[in-house]
Amino acid sequence: MAGLERFSEFSLINRLTGRFERHPKQRNRTHQADAEILRMADGSWLAATVDGIHEEYALGLLRDPYILGWNVVAHSLSDLAAVGAAPLGVLLAVNFPRAANPAWQDAFFAGVDASVRAHGTYCLGGDTNFAPEPSFTCTALGTITRSEPTLRLGAAVGDLLYITGPLGTGNLLGIASQVDKGLWAEFERAYKPLARLKEGLALAPFVSCAIDTSDALLQGLAIIADLNEVGIDFEHHPDLYSRPLVQMTEKIRFPLWLVNGFGMGEYELILAVAPAREQEFLARARAENFGVMRIGRVRREPGITLHLEGKALPLDVPSLLNLFGTCSDIQDYLKELLAYDARLRGGR
């Protein structure tokens, strides 16, 4: 757990929340699960999570109100998927400027409605206010009936790591916004990802731990490694990524693997599977028509190693994930990422 202090976000969380008393019936401690999990009187678990879409809007990566509404719901439901919870519903907290266009507001809530329906759940209520800067926050509630929830804890040496779908669907927007505004607008209109609720429920009996990728694949891998005091081999290959993303990175000569450090991520699940359970896991995934793909393995030696073009390259993940906060804008950030890749490949 102490290793997470190397990441600015987790260091801030630890500093601000260290004084809080934990609920006696809470199953997880800070950072140990994608949602907060409490034991209920009947022996089941309540899963609760809150998340927002703010930076993506402020940076201009998501501006369409319908797509914003869709994603603010999916973002929180993805946390329920990671702990293997069935959703009860969501609550919204939204701030609009007083001069907001009513048609814009209507489109936002139409996106919310479409998203909750697509995920098979409900909007239970919430709070709407006015503020100079808009903000969009969603709380999701769910239940877990298994004896134990799926946590970020539990990965063991030798476990195999799988992903529930293609990487890079969210990061495609980030890159397109800097490369081709027309293509970015086209991608944004189609950006309606589904949280992997079905996968989280069906595959939970076969996995040792899980985390979602909404905050970047590399961050998810680093959290699993640090919490479980293990290392991870990340086996990169282009087939893991959405085809449009591969095409775009090839066009602009941007190293594909670097998109795994972007904060937009996507709503996939990283699942750790013990070798003895792998065949059962894959059989269940095939039966449910889930497109799981193997991305790596858990090892004893600490750290994250990128396996790229026949080379094993140790990654400085804290530097990569803290990098955005040190850059003046997205273009500067992309340049710094390219410089990191050059140093990595050059062995410096």
Image: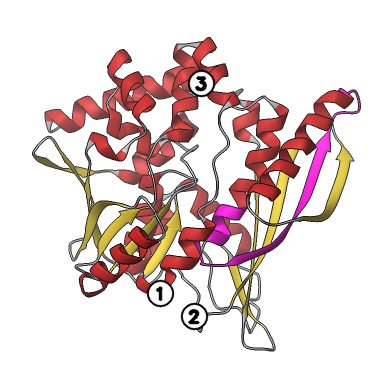
Q: Is residue 327 left or right of residue 125?
A: left
Give the camera-side residue of 223 and 42.
42
Front label number (2 vs 1): 1
Q: CA distance from mark 1 to mark 3?
A: 43 Å
Residue annotated with mark 3: 329
Magenta span contains residue 99:
yes
The residue at the far front in this view is 287
The kind of residue on which mark 3 rests is Asp
Q: Which mark is residue 205?
A: 1
Q: Secondary structure at mark 3?
A: loop
Residue count near mark 2 (Cα–Cα under 10 Å), binned few <14, some 14–19, many ≥20 = some
Measuring 56% from the left and 28% from the top, which residue is drawn there?
190
Dividing the picture into quadrants, the one containing residue 237 is: top left
Q: Earlier in the sequence, mark 2 or mark 1?
A: 2
Above or below, comparing residue 160 to residue 239 in the picture: below
Q: Percent x, y for residue 199?
A: 46, 59
Front label number (1 vs 3): 1
Q: Percent x, y for residue 275?
A: 21, 70
Q: CA distance from mark 3 to mark 2?
A: 43 Å
Image quarter in which the C terminus is found: top left
Front label number (3 vs 2): 2
Asked if marks 3 and 2 touch (Cβ < 8 Å), the reply is no
Part of the protein shown in magenta: 77-101
The kind of residue on which mark 1 rests is Pro
Dividing the picture into quadrants, the one containing residue 290 is: bottom left
Asked if marks 2 and 1 touch (Cβ < 8 Å), the reply is no
Q: Which mark is residue 148?
A: 2
Measuring 29% from the left and 23% from the top, which residue is drawn there?
338
Magenta span contains residue 265:
no
Measuring 72% from the left and 37% from the top, which residue is drawn there?
111
The kind of residue on which mark 2 rests is Glu
